[in-house]
Amino acid sequence: MRLDHLWLTDFRNYTMAELAPDPDGLTVIRGTNGQGKTNLLEAVSYLATLESFRGAPREALVRRGSERAVVRAEASRDGRSLLLEAELPLNGRDRYLLNRQPLRRGRDLLGALRVSIFAPEDLHLVQAGPAGRRDLLDGALVALHPRNDALRSDLERVLRQRGALLRQCDGRLDTDAESTLDVWDSKLDELGSRWADLREEVTGSLGPLVSDYFAELTSAPAHLSLTYRRSWEGRLADALLASRREDVRRGVTTIGPHRDELDIQLAEMPARTHASQGEQRGVALALRLGVHSLVGTVVGSAPVLLLDDVFSELDPARSAALIRLLPPGQSLLTTAGPLPDGPVPALVVSVGAGEVRAA
Amino acid sequence: MSIYAGPVQDLIDELGRLPGVGPKSAQRIAFYLLKASKEDALRLSRSIVEVKDRISFCRRCFNVAEGETCSMCSDGRRDPSIVCVVEEPRDIVAVEKTGEYSGLYHVLQGAISPIEGIGPEQLRIRELLARIETESVTEVILCTNPNLEGEATAMYLARMLTPLGVKVTRIASGLPVGGDLEYADELTLGRALEGRRQVDV
């Protein structure tokens, strides 16, 4: 997976801009704050995920005073060259083209370009509730196997259907509701158990990778470990039956993969409550790098790694360590500060006044 | 919200309630009707009234019917020992086009979906069970959609029907005939692999 060339028209603060990153090494994008470094990463990831990783609304993505933004990229996958284009009108639906062919569904563009993103907000992976950590595992599973995406959306739908049924029960369970609940429980058992198994498996593969990255990125000798913790014991079907009365009373599904947790332990203490802010930053970055390198190894071609403002999270020694540790493959990194000593990036560009120039 | 004179807005609102018609299309159709000749508009309104007056649902299988029973149920050449259960009357048309089926049907008029407030009691399930008990049915083919709600409905029906001693089957899911493997989506192809069969020589 390689990004060869990126062109922007009326995207964010750029009227026209282009970027040709180094094909298989590190490209550093420098510039003072507010110049649009992150916007370049956002454009790349938009083509990969069809949404802004900053959760920005449409009006923010289209340059003020313009009707539409266009993001175009040339990428290579398995030696094949692909042209990806996204047209984002201020009003109305996006248009996507792959090799100049209009695509009927946006979904058809997914997979043409794959990225891994690390942004400063990723600190919430460690500090906030379990939802973000579950999303991290789910994202890894979908990246590892596209079929998992359908499994996940089926699971979400079963949970919504079961939740709606429980609310309709209004605290009471008659035989009719009971037999309908049986059906959804059996679906939830099938899909939920499979999903939890997959998450547990991927946690097992991620553990050593994340732990290694963390050890290298922080000077702390503390050992990092990942454990997937289910919200039930034994067979999900039995557990659902056991918690049925409670579920009906509360009108929600109280156990299942949507209540599971990815435990992150640092020196055998929960990282969420016991790690320092600096350590938590290191954990978040190690998690992202772990997923990135796992996907690269399993799928055979690594996604493009996008690191937004990552040096602000690390001291100079750790910043240098990060550059040294970058997994093989193409990476794009933004920074407002000076480059750390040590390995020299393959390409440095600077961003200012709405332009991208070779530094 | 309403910017048009009362009756015009009423028409737009009514049209907007139709499936697949959004606010913009509703407005377009309303203005088309305003401009159309009176005869054209009356013909449309007459066909709507007529379909509501003359067409109802078959008392036996809940297919659309002109009269008490539908054309399938009143056709004596069809095999009454097999019943194919579908979600909507239009699914009957799809099955009929195959020319592979000559049994009877039962239309559920939907699928179990709590999100939309549809449970078993909103569907024609009680009537299906009654049919199995009173008619000499030997096989029930569950022909609901291969999506989550259709699968759940099929599973529910299987649980209700099996105790009645009738053979219950589910349509297979797999690849479209005459297609190319490379164009199959991974989910369908995965299902087709799961449901593979030994080749008889």
Image: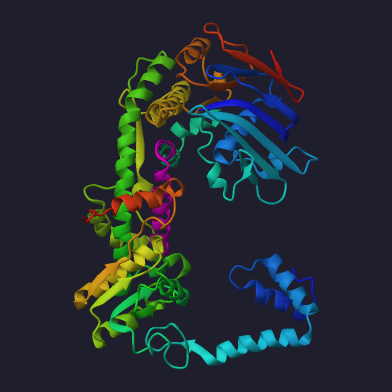
- Which residue occupies the foreground of this view, B114 or A102? A102
Q: Is there any visible trace of residue B42 in the rendered image?
A: yes
Most distant residue in the front direction? B201
Residue shown at the point (52%, 41%) measured from the top left: A110
Question: Does residue B83 appear to the left or right of A11 in the view shown?
Answer: left
Q: Is residue B111 above or below residue B79?
A: above
Residue shown at the point (66%, 24%) measured from the top left: A19
Res. A35 image quadrant: top right
Range of magenta residues: A138-164
Q: Main secondary structure of the magenta part?
A: helix
Q: How is the image coloured?
A: rainbow
Q: Is residue A69 above or below residue A282?
A: below
Which x, y percent locates residue A161?
41, 61
Which x, y percent locates residue A318?
48, 13
Most distant residue in the top direction? A342
Residue shown at the point (42%, 57%) measured from the top left: B176
Question: Does residue A58 appear to the left or right of A154 in the view shown?
Answer: right
Which x, y percent locates residue A9?
73, 34
